[in-house]
Structure formats: structure tokens, C-alpha cells
Image: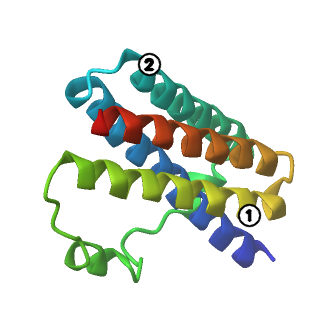
Amino acid sequence: MAKLENKIFRIVDANLNRAREGLRVCEDIARFILNSRALTKELRDVRHKVSKIKKELAGRGVALIASRDTECDCGRLNASKLMTPRKGYEDIMTANMERVKESLRVLEEFCRIIDERFSPRFASLRFDVYAIEKRAYIKRIS
């Protein structure tokens, strides 16, 4: 079971990082391109909530970081090859919002195994991101 638990922690660690990175990209677009104080704050708040949960999960010891194995990650080398060219900030925003939503869903699912108390928190954050995404889209087209 310890080996499987390590693999699950690896999934959780990767998706915590992916969600926070995607949120940061969107936050910078909201701040510097859309010039929206409200969207910037909302995205920052979600990012901080994910960071807070990460700290709580890390309370399980160093399991998250210890499970990290970037050298042996079979998807690592393919990532750069699969990058889609971006035509503008809209593409970057869209891709990163998708990345965040997908990561939050993965976290919601795998936290049911690690500690089910975290799962509803990730579900709630995912729905918050859906609403923020809509407001950002409206801001972009207006």
C-alpha cells in the first residue's frame, strides 16, 4: 500500500503545482492586461486557498514532496513537444483556466483516497473557478 500511496501523493503534488501555476498565469493576465482588480483578487484568493490546502496536506509529513520524481516522469519530455502555439493572451488565459479546472478535479478525486475532508474543498474551488472564468470572459470581450 505504501508504494500506491506514494504514487497517489505524486499525482496530488503535481496537480497542486499545476493548479497554482495556472492560477498565477491567469492572475497576471487579469492584473496586467485586463486591468481588473476584482478578477485579480478572486484568482489570487483561489490560489491562496489551494496553497493553504497544500500546507494542510503536507502536514502528513513530507509525503508530497518526497513523492516527487521529475527525473523519472514519463510525461516530462513530451510536455514541451505537445505545447500548442499561443496566438495571444486569450489563448494563454483559456489554456490556463482549463489547466486549473482539470487539476482541481483531479485533486477532488484523489483526495477522496488520501483524506476525504479535502475533496469538497477542491470541488468548491473548481466551481469558484468556473464563475471567475465566466467573468473573465465577459471582461475580455467587453
Q: Residues within 10 Å of mark 1 (few under 14, many from 20)?
A: some
Q: Disc 1 marks which amino acid?
A: Glu
Q: Which mark is residue 109?
A: 1
Q: How is the image coloured?
A: rainbow
Residue 10, image x and y in percent?
58, 65
Q: Residues within 10 Å of mark 2 (few under 14, many from 20)?
A: some
How many labels were placed on the picture? 2
Residue 47, image x and y in percent?
51, 34
54 to the left or right of 134: right
- Residue 13: quarter of image: bottom right
* Tag 2 secondary structure: helix
- Residue 127: quarter of image: top right
Residue 96, image x and y in percent?
37, 52
25 to the left or right of 104: left
Whether tag 2 and tag 1 are in contact, CB under 8 A, the answer is no
Residue shown at the point (39%, 46%) measured from the top left: 21
